[in-house]
Image (spheres, rainbow, N blue to C red):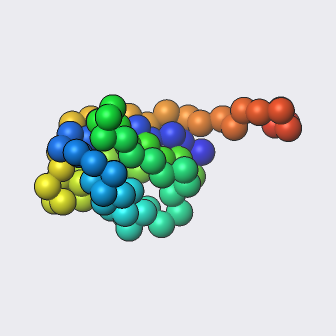
Amino acid sequence: MNQVTMKVTGMRCGMCEAHICDVIRKQYPEAKAVRASHGSDRASFRIEGEVDQAKLRNAIDETGYRCESVSVEPYEKKGLFHRR
């Protein structure tokens, strides 16, 4: 599983956050833990497999917001009941 984090500028309120989350879910219906924050100008989600960063950037840019960066890092579930 991968953790995808983006710097997205132009968000001003909770509705902007919801709009970004909707764009992510539309591009990647299998995405989990989709979040956006206008306070930190960040959006993130987890997904199995690879992410087409150009496709993701274009989808966000087409909505009027600006995707300035995308980072993809391996995600390992952590917690009390996690098995190794």
**14 relative position to 28: left or right:** left
**Residue 72: image location, x then y, percent:** 43, 37
Q: Is residue 74 above or below residue 28?
A: above
> Which residue occupies the foreground of this view, 14 or 30?
14
Query: Which residue sits at x=77%, y=33%?
Result: 79
Which quarter of the image is occupied by the C terminus? top right
> Which residue occupies the foreground of this view, 47 or 12?
12
Query: Which residue sits at x=55%, y=35%?
Result: 74
**Residue 24: image location, x then y, percent:** 38, 58
Number of marks present in the image shown: 0
Residue 47 seen anywhere in this rendered image of the structure: no
Query: Which residue sits at x=14%, y=55%?
Result: 64
> Which residue occupies the foreground of this view, 78 or 52?
78
**Residue 32: image location, x then y, percent:** 55, 54
From this viewpoint, which residue is outermost toward the front?
A: 13
**50 relative position to 67: left or right:** right
Query: Which residue sits at x=20%, y=40%?
Result: 9
**Residue 58: image location, x then y, percent:** 20, 55
Which quarter of the image is occupied by the N terminus? top right
Residue 39 seen anywhere in this rendered image of the structure: yes
